[in-house]
Every structure is written in C-alpha cells, then in structure tokens.
C-alpha cells in the first residue's frame, strides 16, 4: 500500500502528469455546482465541494451511448446489418468521487454483470477505470450514507482514497489499481505518522457529523404485496410531477431506453438513460399501461430501491444515501421519510 | 407570513368541515431549507400541515388537471392566472374551485441565496417581515427579501390573485414602472449567430429530465411531442439539437399562455434559466395582441381565436 | 466479449398473412450465417427481439418449434412503429433477430402429464410452437393427453388455419376450436368464449398442467374456471407480455416486483404470480 501526501498545487500538477497514462475525470466547477469532466483543454479540477450535482455514473454508463451502427443504403453489401460501434476502453481514472457514489458502482454491478448476461460496455469501461475516492469532511445534512452501508470515508469500491487535510491531500492506495496510479506519480512524499493520524481523526469526526439516519432492518422481512398495497403511497406520491430529476441524479438508477436514430442512409442504435417516473416507460404497444398512474410509478421507484432489489440480490438497499434526490426533488419528496414508512409498515 | 399560514389553515378547516370542498391543496413545510411540498388534505384534522412562506414556488395549478372533485386551493397572482388559463382551456371548471387568494410578496430565489452564502449548506431559513435569516454550520446571515426575489417575481405586476373566492389578507400594492422584458430586449439585439450561441450555452447542461415541462401547468398534453413515437418528432438522446428542439418547441407551445410563474426555472436540477425562451413569446404576444395570459376569463387567448378583422392577410 | 445486445442478421424467407383483417402476419426467417442458427437454440415458450435497423426492436414469442429446424418463425400483430414497418417489408429483405430470450414452458415438469393448452386471439404463437413440439414423434410419447382450446373473435381471425384443420384430423390431440361469434353456416366447430368452452370441454385436472395464453380479459375469466376444475395454482402456467427493451434483464423496464418478465419470465405459474405485485 502506498500512502503519499501532496500539497494542493502538487496534486493539481500530479493529475496533469497522470494524463500520459490515464484519461482523467475530475470535479470541475460549472456555475453554481461541480460535475465530473475530463481533465483536458484547461479544465480546472476543483475539490471544494460537498458533492457533484450529477453523480459519476455517466462516466461508466453515459446518458446517451451509441451501441451499434448500420447502413440503410441498399447498394452496400452490409445494408441493414447491425454492427458494433468501435469504442475506446482505454485506461481512465475518476479522481475525487465521494465514497457514496463509488459504492453505487458496486450496487449496480450486479445488474450489468450477472451470471446470465454481461453488459459489455459497462463492464469494459468499469474494468478500465481506477477510482480515487475523496473522503467527505463535511457531509451534507441530507446525507444518510452510514445507514445504508457506506460512510464519509468508506473504502468499499475504491482503488485509492484522497483525504483533504486543509493544506494538502493524503492519497492512499487500497488496491493494485490504486497503487499503480499512485506509483506512476513522481511527486508527493511518503505520508508520515502525523498526517495519517490527522486523516484518521478526520474520518472519525466526519462520521459523527452525519445527522440523517434511516431504518432498513425490517425491509427484508416485509411481505412484498403488503408494502405494495400500503396506504401511504397515495400521500407520498401526490406532489410528484413525474420528472426525471431523482432518477437522473441518482447514482444507482440504471434504467435505460434503446432508440434507433438515422441521418440519411446511416443510422445508430443508441441507449439513453430512462426513468420509471415517465408514463411511457411501461406503455405497451397495445395502449395498455401497467403503471399509468403516478402513484404506481412513485411506488415502483421506492419499491425497486428498498424492496425488490433487497429481495432479488440480498445485497442491501439500492441506495447509497447521497441525498441528491432529497435536495433536488422539485416537490420535496423525501426518500428518508419513505424508508421510515416502509421499514415501519 | 405566519399570519398567512394561520389564515390558510383556518379557511381550509372551515371548507373541509362544511363540505364546501372535497380536498384542499396547499403547501406543507419542506424537509429541506427553501423547499416546500405540495400537499392534498382531505381531513380537517390535518389542516395544520398547511404552510405558506416565500418558498412556495411550485405552481399548484399542476394538480388540478383532470380532477373531477371540488377543490380548495391557495393561489397567488401567477397561480391564479394559471387557474384562469386552465378554466379557459377546459381543464377544470370554475365551479369546482374554491380559490384562497394569497397577496404575494414574491418568492425567494433559492439559488441566489445559496450563491450569497458561497454555496455553503443552508440548514435553516426564517422570515421576519421584509427580511429573512439563513443559517448553517458556522454561519448566519440576514438578507433583504427584495434583493433575493426570483427574477420573475421582481418584475411581476400581478402579485394579487386575479380570481379568488376569499383572500387571506388585504391586497399588496402592485409594482409600477417595471420593465419585465429588459433581458429579452438584450437578447433581441444580438445577431442570429450570437443568439444561437447564447441559447446553446444556456441549455448546455440540460439532462432532459423534463422537470421544467412537468412543473409547468400548461404542459398537460396527454402525450408530449417529445414522447410521441409515431411519428417521432425529436430524438431522445442528449444531442444538443434535440435538446434545443425540446426547449424551443415547448416555449412555442406556451406562447400566449405562460404567466411567467417561474416554476420551470425553480425546479431545474441544473439551474437552466429557461424563462429566456418563454419570455420572448410573452413579449411578442403582449406587443402584437396586447394580451397577458390568465388575466381575463371572458376572452379567448389570441392564438386560439379567429377574427375577421385580423390584420393578417392569410386569415381572410 | 460477447455482446448480448447484438442481433443475428436474418433474411425474411416467407411472409404469410394469417387473419382476414390482415393485421397478423407470420414471418419465416433464415439466418444469414448458419453458425448463428446453431447459437439460436430455443425451447417452446421463449421469445426473441425482432430487430430492424433504423426502427428498433420488438419482443415477439417464437412461433416455430425447434423440431422444425432450419427456419424460425414469428407471428406479428401490427400495432406500433416497428411492427407497422415490418408488415411492409418484403421477402428477401434483411433484418435482425436477437435471442432466444426468457424462460420456457415447464417441459420437464410436464413430462408424463396431461397437458391442456388454452389460447385466445393472436397470443397463440408460442402455443403453436408448443403443440408442434409435443406432437413431434420424438416427443409425443413424453406426454399423456394433449387438449387444446383455442378461440378467436371470428373464424377469419384464427391463426394457422391449415394446421388447426390438420390437428383436428389427428387422434393424438383433442382440439376444441371456438369463435366468439360467426354467421358462417359452414362453421363446424364451437361458438362461445374460451372460458365457457374450457368449462364445457375440460373434464378433469387430474395429473394435468394448463398453459394459458391470451388477452387479459380471457385470462381473467379462465383462471377461476381452471381453479374450479381443480388445477392447483402451481400447474396453471401463463405467459406474460410487457414493454421490453433489452430483453436480458438489464434495462430495468419490464419488472413485476423483483421479477423481470424478459429474463425471469415470460412464463410464470399462477402460484408465482399470486406472490408478485398485481402490476401487469
């Protein structure tokens, strides 16, 4: 294991240096908030944030991704034959991801990589990625990571962890991938005992700062159809406007749509993020829609995360407690309350 | 503001107890600072959930579409204008409604407040008359409401409801001498290329979550053109051309109907000021037809009416 | 790395119009690469995604039986964008097939048992596959009595009319064809709804499985008939339809509770369905 300490200037320089071997994604301040962007063309990394507005999921699972391509030109021998689009799966690094968002990759892996079917794009991109987490010194009031198997300094799913020590970053490797990344950097000095102790104290202190908790202990034992027909869905769903904010901001929402798009005689098959809040998500060709009511859709989202996933994979809830949906739901539907209602029903 | 809240609860209780309405729609104090949750109350015992403050920025008219029961609801100036539009467009009947009018002092721009405290996390907001206090870990600041109103509220000339059954307080004075279209005029001066660049930049961060469309009381089409698959008018990826098409066309669908309530901007998770699209159309409709949406219930909106004396040749 | 989203290229070998309203056509496909045909090894009850470049994909039950070999067929109802386009395609044109997908009817459990097949309308496709499979000389001894109740709105709306007539002639399968109504004086089969005919013709649930495929209304009214006859919920087998995209349990669209209809289904027993949320 490597443990190195960098001054903040050294770290910024080190990230630039890293670009010779990695495509580097860093948090970049855009207007009022941060998002992950490739470190190139002068993008300036900024580690002064609580969390990025969008999670890092799009780096592994882009919002729109070309799957296949084809030609509709009948004069071509391969007309109408759908073919793989060449893709770049070269080595990349996500630097500065919060532990909650990193854990999300572990939760959704079971969907994209299961014994029966393997999503080639998600898997190859994930395999090519080194994840450098960023300990959370100041968790948001709406975060509840410690209730759902993560924590402000949780190391699950990380290859390395950065800790902000005020004037410097401590970066420690946790896996061989992380060691390779850290080993490739010339700068930084071996972290001494004082620095390590400081980081430990920060981690402990930060965990205590988590002010939101949610109960999950009884979700597994609930009878699915009883929860499904619970009376509280009517009240919880009333305010919902069926937008995609919660699903698109959520690091663990993985649903997608597949669309064909053509331009002249050439075309692509594309997959786009989709949202179970949209009525057309489940609309059959016949016109029948098993979830044509808002209540059904809101219930689906919470049941999926807090019950169906729990039952299907025995891997806890499909929520990492990042608090984005709590903060940005336009109508203030609060998943923390739903945890309580479902667990206590 | 507490006085408003007290009065809303009192009226709602009276309406539900007497059976004047079946349900009452208002706001409940949110679990996050500066966010309130639209709530539907059926039981008079639950009226104490009802709440009003300067963060009730979501348009409740959204929740009326297609309802067949008798509804009581709170409505400030813009919300009441959307109710009028809904009535004109046959989305709800006036007889179904009991409108509790709110003389509105403007809704606070939560993004501006966050910016003013350096995007530190705000945990609490209190209101005292014309000022409000925001506090978080290690900070507390007092601001004047007038400096932090949403940009639509700062130029609003219909703060009082245009249609109501009962008011929670005396009307507030309307703003005078404001130019609601100052920013539009700035854009109009740009060249075509500059405009394209401006709008491209404006929506660059759009994730097509459709929060703006869904928060808009005008967007009640059973199937929105972006969701239609036969024919498919617009692509569903985040290709900038498709995203632009969505925003432009949606704005056009709101021409002569938009009350500039600001709900679209308020709900956007990435802070796109999409009123820059709708306001131009509001301005055009005002200049060409002298029309402000939702102000009068006794006239058809200019874009859904035919008149033989129309100055355009094509109608003749 | 194997790509489960990539369709096999196929050529449309034959198109048959099935019904008088011309909304149902059967498409027979031949794989462009014979190797792909081997990879496309299926069991009756499974489905596949028909994939048209520029239009998209639709999940359709496989109507042919693996015992037929060489070709694979699908009967497609003209409802949406992709199916409308497909209906206008010509023999010889190239498109794609992705699969086989999903689970199948419980052939191992049904071995040595009586099998009652109940179908309605255009949902008869995977039931056709099943019947052809069961009456193949290699398989027929594996099952006891085979009884089929199949109904459509009127005689013109029945699928696979020639085959139905041929099956009527056989003595190793009991056919009960019915129509909701007809003014055809030459109609020699039953008139009446599927649940009613089921009640009249099926005498016993002893040692039997029932496979039911049809419109929701038919299923709704057939279910109590079967339960009254004594079929336990474990032996009432249904095949569900759901809007799908990926077909492999990844895109998250077709779930009922924690089950994906595309991967964990489309075949479920009534007993399973009763434990799942009623959302289909």
Image: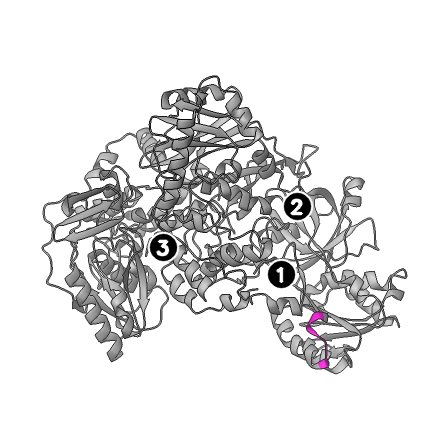
Circle number at residue B219: 3
Question: Which residue is found at the position 47% from the left and 57% from the top?
Answer: A216
Kindly report the distance in space between the C-alpha atoms of the residues bearing marks 3 and 2: 40 Å
Q: How is the image coloured?
A: one colour
Judging from the image, what secondary structure is the residue with disc 1 in?
Answer: loop
Are dots 2 and 1 on a single chain? no
The chain holding disc 1 is C
Looking at this view, is B149 or A157 the one in front?
A: A157
Which mark lies nearer to you, 1 or 3?
1
Q: Which residue is mark 1?
A: C241
Label 1 CA crowd tier, 10 Å (few <14, some 14–19, many 20+): many
Question: Which residue is found at the position 52% from the left and 25% from the top?
Answer: A181
Label 3 CA crowd tier, 10 Å (few <14, some 14–19, many 20+): some
Residue A309 at what x, y percent from top left? 55, 54
The chain holding disc 3 is B
The chain holding disc 2 is A
Residue C21 at what x, y percent from top left? 66, 64
Judging from the image, what secondary structure is the residue with disc 2 in?
Answer: loop
Kindly report the distance in space between the C-alpha atoms of the residues bearing marks 2 and 1: 21 Å
> Where is residue A340, by image quadrant?
bottom left
Residue C14 at what x, y percent from top left? 76, 51
Residue C114 at what x, y percent from top left? 81, 72
Q: Considering only vertical position in the picture, is A159 above or below C248?
A: above
Looking at this view, is B295 or A156 the one in front?
A: A156
Judging from the image, what secondary structure is the residue with disc 3 in?
Answer: loop
Circle number at residue A276: none
In-image side of B132 versus B272 (left or right)? left
Looking at this view, is B236 or B248 the one in front?
A: B236
């Amino acid at each position: 294991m490597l443990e190195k300490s960098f001054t903040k200037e050294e770290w910024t320089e080190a990230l630039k240096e890293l670009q010779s071997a990695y495509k580097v994604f860093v948090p970049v301040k855009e207007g009022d908030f941060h998002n992950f962007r490739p470190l190139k063309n002068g993008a300036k990394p900024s580690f002064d944030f609580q969390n990025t507005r969008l999670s890092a999921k799009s780096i592994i699972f882009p919002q729109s991704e070309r799957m296949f391509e084809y030609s509709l030109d009948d004069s071509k021998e391969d007309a109408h034959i759908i073919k793989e689009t060449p893709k770049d799966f070269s080595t990349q690094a996500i630097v500065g991801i919060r532990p909650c968002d990193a854990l999300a990759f572990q939760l959704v892996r079971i969907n994209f990589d299961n014994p029966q079917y393997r999503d080639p794009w998600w898997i190859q991109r994930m395999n090519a990625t080194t994840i450098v987490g960023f300990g959370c010194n100041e968790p948001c009031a709406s975060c509840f990571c410690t209730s759902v198997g993560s924590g402000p300094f949780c190391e699950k799913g990380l290859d390395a962890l950065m800790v902000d020590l005020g004037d410097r970053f401590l970066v420690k490797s946790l896996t061989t991938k992380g060691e390779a990344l850290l080993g490739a950097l010339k700068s930084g000095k071996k972290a001494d005992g004082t620095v390590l102790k400081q980081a430990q104290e920060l981690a402990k202190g930060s965990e205590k700062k988590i002010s939101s908790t949610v109960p999950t202990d009884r979700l597994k034992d609930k009878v699915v159809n009883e929860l499904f027909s619970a009376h509280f869905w009517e009240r919880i769903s009333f305010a919902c406007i069926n937008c995609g904010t919660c699903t698109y901001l959520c690091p663990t929402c993985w649903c997608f749509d597949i669309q064909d798009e053509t331009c002249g005689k050439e075309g692509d098959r594309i997959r786009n993020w989709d949202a179970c809040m949209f009525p057309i998500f489940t609309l059959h060709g016949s016109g029948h829609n098993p979830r044509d009511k808002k209540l059904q859709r809101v219930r689906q989202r919470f049941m999926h995360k807090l019950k169906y996933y729990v039952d299907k994979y025995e891997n806890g809830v499909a929520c990492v407690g990042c608090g984005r949906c709590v903060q940005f739901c336009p109508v203030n539907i609060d998943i923390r309350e739903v945890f309580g209602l479902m667990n206590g029903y | 503001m507490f006085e408003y809240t007290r009065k809303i609860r009192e009226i709602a209780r009276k309406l539900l107890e007497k059976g004047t309405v079946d349900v009452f729609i208002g706001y409940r104090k949110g679990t996050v600072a500066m966010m309130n949750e639209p709530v539907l109350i059926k039981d008079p015992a639950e009226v104490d959930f009802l709440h009003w403050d300067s963060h009730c920025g979501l348009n409740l008219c959204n929740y009326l579409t297609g309802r067949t029961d008798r509804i009581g609801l709170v409505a400030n100036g813009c919300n009441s204008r959307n109710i009028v539009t809904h009535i004109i467009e046959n989305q709800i009947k006036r007889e179904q409604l009991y409108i509790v009018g709110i003389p509105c002092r403007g809704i606070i721009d939560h993004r501006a407040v966050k910016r003013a405290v350096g995007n530190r996390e705000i945990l609490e907001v209190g209101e005292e008359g014309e000022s409000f206090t925001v506090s978080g870990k290690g900070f507390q600041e007092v601001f004047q409401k007038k400096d932090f109103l949403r940009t639509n509220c700062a130029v609003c000339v219909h703060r009082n409801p245009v249609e109501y059954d009962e008011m929670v307080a005396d009307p507030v004075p309307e703003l005078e001498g404001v130019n609601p279209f100052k920013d539009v005029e700035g854009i109009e001066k740009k060249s075509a290329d500059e405009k394209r660049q401006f709008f491209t930049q404006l929506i660059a961060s759009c994730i097509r979550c459709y929060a703006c469309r869904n928060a808009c009381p005008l967007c009640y089409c059973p199937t929105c053109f972006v969701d239609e698959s036969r024919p498919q008018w617009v692509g569903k990826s985040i290709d900038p051309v498709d995203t632009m098409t969505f925003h432009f066309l949606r704005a056009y669908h709101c021409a002569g109907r938009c009350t500039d309530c600001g709900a679209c901007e308020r709900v956007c998770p990435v802070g796109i000021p999409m009123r820059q699209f709708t306001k131009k159309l509001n301005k055009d409709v005002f200049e060409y037809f002298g029309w402000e949406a939702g102000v009068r219930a006794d006239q058809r909106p200019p874009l859904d009416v035919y008149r033989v004396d129309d100055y355009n040749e094509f109608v003749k | 790395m194997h790509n489960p989203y990539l369709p096999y290229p196929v050529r449309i070998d034959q198109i048959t119009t099935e019904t008088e309203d011309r909304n149902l056509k059967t498409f027979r496909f031949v794989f462009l690469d014979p190797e792909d045909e081997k990879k496309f090894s299926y069991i009756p009850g499974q489905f596949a995604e028909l994939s048209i470049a520029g239009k998209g994909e639709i999940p359709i039950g496989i109507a042919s039986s693996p015992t037929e070999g060489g070709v694979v067929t699908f009967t497609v109802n003209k409802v949406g964008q992709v199916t409308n386009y497909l209906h206008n395609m010509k023999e010889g044109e190239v498109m794609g097939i992705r699969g086989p997908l999903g689970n199948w009817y419980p052939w191992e459990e049904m071995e040595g048992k009586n099998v009652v097949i109940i179908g309605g309308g255009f949902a008869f496709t995977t039931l056709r596959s099943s019947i052809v499979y069961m009456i193949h000389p290699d398989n027929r001894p594996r099952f006891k009595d085979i009884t089929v109740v199949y109904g459509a709105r009127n005689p013109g709306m029945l699928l696979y009319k020639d085959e139905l007539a041929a099956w009527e002639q056989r003595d190793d399968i009991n056919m009960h064809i019915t129509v909701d109504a007809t003014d055809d004086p030459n109609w020699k089969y039953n008139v009446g709804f599927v649940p009613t005919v089921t009640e009249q013709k099926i005498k016993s649930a002893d040692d039997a499985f029932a496979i039911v495929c049809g419109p929701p209304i038919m299923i709704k009214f057939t279910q109590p008939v079967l339960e009254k006859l004594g079929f336990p919920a474990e032996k009432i087998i249904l095949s569900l339809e759901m809007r799908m995209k990926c077909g492999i349990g990844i895109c998250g669209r077709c779930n009922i509770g924690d089950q994906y209809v595309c991967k964990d289904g489309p075949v479920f027993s009534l007993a399973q369905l009763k434990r799942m949320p009623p959302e289909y």
